Image: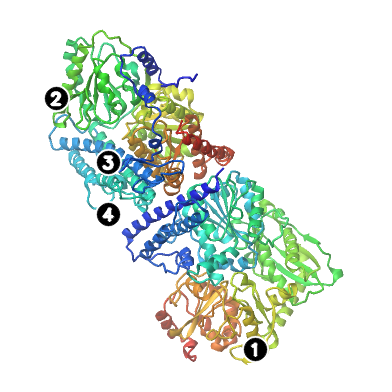
Amino acid sequence: MVEEKKKSADPGVVELLEMKEKDETFPTTAWDRYDIMQPQCRFGELGICCTICLQGPCRINPTGKEPSRGVCGATAYTIVSRNLIRKIAAGCAAHSDHGRHIAHTLKALLEGKTDAYSIKGEEKVKTVAKRIGIEVEGKDTNTLAKEVLDMALEDYSRHDEETPLIWTKTIVTPERFEILDRCDVVPYNIDATIAEVMHRTHIGVDADPVPLIFNGIKCAIADLAGEHISTDISDILFGVPELTVTESNLGVLKENSVNVAMHGHNPVLSEVIADVAEELQEEVTAAGAEGINLVGICCTGNELLMRRGIPLATNFASQELALLTGVLDAMIVDYQCIYPSLGWWAQCFHTRLISTSNLCRQTGDTHIEFNPKTAKEDAKKILRLAIEAFKNRGTREVNIPDYKETCVVGFSMEQVEEILRTQSDDPMQYMVDQIKEGKVAGIAAIVGCNNIKTCHDEAHLKVARELIRNNVLIIATGCAAGAYVRAGLANSNATKEIAGEGLKEFLTTLGKGMNLDEPLPPIWHMGSCVDNSRIHDFVTAIANKMGVDIKDLPVVASAPEAMSEKAVVIGTWLVATGWPTHVGILPFIHGSDLVVQVAENTARDVYGGYFVFETDADKAAKRLVNIIKQRRWKLGIGTDEEIVYANGQTAHELFEETEEKKATVANGGK
Amino acid sequence: MITQKELFSMAITGGVSAVGYADVLLNKALRTHGPNKEIGYPDTGYELPCFYGWTTTPVKKLGDLPSLLGEVRGKIMLEPTYENALLAGEATMWAAEIVEAIRYIDNETPYADEAPPGTQEYCGFVGDPVLRTLGIAFVDDTIPGAIVFIGKAKDPKALAKMIRDCQNKGMLLMATFDIIRQLEDEGISMGTDIMLFPLGEFTQAIHGLSFAIRAALAFGGVQRGDREGLLKYLKMRPKVVVIQLGPLDQIKVAAEFAVLFNGSPTITDQDVEEIPGKYVVQKDYDQIIQTAIEIRDMQIKLSAIDIPVAYGPAFEGETVRRPDTYVEAGGPSKTKVFELVKMREADQVEDGKITFIGKDADELEEGSGSNLGILVEVYGKKMQEDYESVLERRIHQFINFAEGAWHTGQRSLLWIRLSKKGVESGLRFKHFGDILYAKLHDDFGVLLNRIQVTVMTDQNEIEKHFPEALESYDARDKRVAGLIDEKVDTFYTCTLCQSFAPNHVCIVSPERLGLCGAINWLDAKASNQITPTGPNQPIVKGDTIEEEKGQWTGVNDAVKEHTHGKLDVFNLYTMMEEPMTSCGCFECIVGLVPEANGVIVVNREHSGMTPLGMKFSTLAGTVGGGQQTPGFIGVGRYYLVSKKFISADGGFHRIVWMPKQLKEEMMDRLKARAEEVGTPDFVDKIADETVATDPAELVEYLNKVDHPALKLPSMM
């Protein structure tokens, strides 16, 4: 008998899933549907199914026999590259459109068309302005903000092909810009770059894999710009996140409150909802509730967690289960990573599913389109629907899993600098010294999604724990960060219990510096997935301080449970900016040896970063630790032990595991 | 296990990736710089060498490249066969050359900051001067082969042992990727001056191949784009082997097939299905170098010498600078020093007796100066007194071969240093005895039956031998002064370089030494004694045809024979008509400047522009390879002060320009020669790069100083 695969590392989620199993009337979950979907398409998995033109679908025989080319003559490497970079373009479109919407919100504010917003991050306006080369002296905040906004919008609309994106040129190390420029992957216009990829991958345009992939990389660099613009303008509008202590996981739902979950990615609406919630207290009381309990899901949740300490209820994989608690009165969604099943789920509960973006509707939802000009009214309208729903809860069983954990969040770049400044007037130098001394062996950015193919959150936790034990400081965003705050890894206890000695000392010193009795957590939550820009900034600042590039630093990135096209694009720019990047789910490229080779090896030669594909989280963690040691060695800051480790048999054994991985690939990643 | 088919497949996808990459970078560079942007590497006369060797199309501008890249892109076939893998290798070679050339646009040292902090600077492209400096050693098997290390070793200690082994065997080494850092960890010095080039990572590896191709072009007389000739030559020399340590990837394999395309094999420690003789597996690090030697049939001339530091030609160019010096003898320390080789009777020499008298390095204070005497006493049936100086001059090289030892000067003017690192590793003065005993036996075993060496730092002991030394030097000088071309009836050939430059022969006379500067008439004579069938064959001058120009029947016959009929007339004393050819190893180039009615002299170390509008490296490209090029000759520097220096063309007074540094290095000899010809102030009239780098400036200067060349008959 085959033992049933563990579905989640979150005991609350496991409880709800068990409960769901007992009642056949519930809709299916993603886990169910994944099982039903088996076996998944092998051609699709390998990336060698092409549906770009209507002569297809064409698929290449992965065993080397016929068909070896599509109808148009495209070989596996052309098909895989085209499919891959279309994913990159989609990811870039999502992030950068998000940035555009925030920019448009700032525009509405500056043009006096909305009263729902103000500039809460006045200092941020100045720092961004300075960074992008705007003279700040003698200008008031609004003037400066307008200039910043114009430059940001220009990155979406520039027609001079010779001028690089401002949000590329001003955010990377000089050495990195030189590499990117030489490789012709510096975009001049975010939107045009997406269009370029779509054009290039149209039937009968580019068939040459490296130029195709490089266009994908250019689009990923555009994505980094879009993400950075999102973060910069969000901070300008809503303030720069600061250290906050709060709680997370499904246990934050309250039986006697109007529970409103905000799900998606863009904070422009959720911030207003948080602003106006208190104004409705009377109506709430009248409805018989104690209050409105705002909670977050996914990255809208991360944005709220970072800036307001609003608890994160759950992350991507378990979004449907939030309804199963029976107490969720409204789920407000903006966009990205919203399961289309939610409409169906909402139909089976009292929960109101309210979609708010013109881009994102669900069948079975209530669509209340959000508009900056009427934001406050929209927000109230939405909350009133939640209050109505609360009244209609009926007698359904309440199942709030009794799990929640304390979490310390709010590690924006500015906050991190302030924390480090408690130790030295030159905060980044202090960080550099800690790394050089080996107290902090390195930095790991753990990012990305959940993926139903692997046990929910488990890979996130395994990779992080092993790295923390090895004195690697974790900076996290997105659903990875969502996993840590809910599992109790983003608090002082985690430092005390699992951090290696050096890391523990570092975090304890900083905790004292911040006048806390406790050490800082070993995982620094930096925000939503667009806030990977903060990860980039932090590590770029370290690189600049050391006078090197990210490719030289003891840093790694990992997306243990990568799922979305945004994860694909993030991984791509991480690699293109010099990060060794682990991906725990096999992307759809293994149908082309060439593309896999480029991702795993050639990328390292050209960009310094490279992909590490490893589905076994334990092995992945070991390899990441090894990479940190290798890089410490190469940078000339390795301890004797690290040098032996980086050079010795262990390093080679890890390489040899690639053989094993090949076998995994041959079996379709199972 | 990677099967052959998978290996071919990797090479092919690697080739596809490489040309795609090059194409992206090339077109970006074209957009930035335009098609007329000049491209090329510093210090080479071979444009982009991989193109120069393999195609007849000149490559001078960015705009020349797209059609060439298209040519190789068009050759890549996807079917995984050996032939297709080789074609992908060729494509990868050109792609890498393009990628690298782009790095050198507007930047002569693009890799200055590339290496991680604290690591040896990557050298990237290695210029022609280094190639030509190695020249002589490259061609006489002192350097038995060249090994390019790629990847990362799984055992850095074993890697270091391999490197030491190679250095002791005299090999030229190139390191790439993480291996550079590993060598750094193991305390192994690297540099273009010590025959261990830290090329860099990724496409920088192409510069290893480029070095080999240029060897063929510079020494082999292979013409631009003579694909067949080039491949034929490269299969013989230089004996290149790639050692690939650690995991393979498509680009590394493609690069290795690029090398294979150029006739040289790869040895790997990975699990690969072998291609016999071409892609060979050797997982035992202790056996890798032996496998390399066997696969290329390298001739190892150096025998192991039991001293505590590495020993080989790699360290000949190593300089021990003042701060790194533990102890020095002679030079600025003004201590009493001498070195002397003396022929004795059989019963006066006990073979193998090595004596040290005085305090050795470990008993001396760091930073101190020491007296030093080196007395080598030899006996041999074939030994002649004339050879004493030949043997004695070799002491310089033999000592310099030791890592951490530095020797310059000669006789009682020598200057020796031992480095701190060397002394720390156990190097002592007494080891000079071991070295000289072993090396003199190796190289002159035929002449010498017994050798004993006394090394002394004790003042009294030195005083005892000093008068004999001075007496010997004096007697030799008198003998040599009488040694002129007219007084001998025999010259010698030197065909040492024919392994590299098949059609070149040097004619060595008492007053014209070999153009490499390493072989004078006495050397050649001794060499012929040692190896009667060797490269130095006696030539009976025969009847005089042209006395002034230096043409003799016997010499003409010899030249015809040794150039395989390519030349049949040869003049020793003129550079204007049927002059001597050059292999490529010349110390200096002498070139006619018609406007100045004289010649310039440029030495290989000079990287700047000359009034001829060409740098040394470009000039060298036209002079080398066994061609007669009237108006240009390659010479050994001491020929400049010979009475026979282009004596048919006006001689010494024709020199109108030479680099400042060369002038300073040769100042004493130049002045002596100037006085000899009755113009004591002549040396000051020779222009240098500080006053002229083009013909107009040069003529202006010559007029200003009233240079005698202006009054000589026209040279043309």
Q: Judge whether residue A639 can be spotted in this image.
A: no
Q: Nearer the viewer, mark 1 or mark 2?
A: 1
Kind of residue at disc 3: Val
Q: Residues within 10 Å of mark 2 (few under 14, many from 20)?
A: some
Instruction: Find the distance from the CA under tag 2 to the CA under tag 4.
Output: 44 Å
Where does label 3 land, which residue? A128
Q: Residues within 10 Å of mark 3 (few under 14, many from 20)?
A: some
Instruction: Find the distance from the CA under tag 3 to the CA under tag 2.
Output: 31 Å
Where does label 4 land, which residue? A162
**Tag 3–tag 4 contact (CB < 8 Å):** no
Where does label 2 land, which residue? A377
**Tag 2–tag 4 contact (CB < 8 Å):** no
Q: Mark 1, chain letter? A: B
Q: Position of residue B216 (x, y in %)?
A: 55, 67
Q: Position of residue B231 (x, y in %)?
A: 54, 65
Q: Earlier in the sequence, mark 2 or mark 4?
A: 4
Where does label 1 land, which residue? B553
Instruction: Find the distance from the CA under tag 3 to the CA under tag 4.
Output: 23 Å
Dots 3 and 4 on the same chain: yes
Q: Residue at x 25, y 22 (%)?
A: A343
Q: Residues within 10 Å of mark 4 (few under 14, many from 20)?
A: few
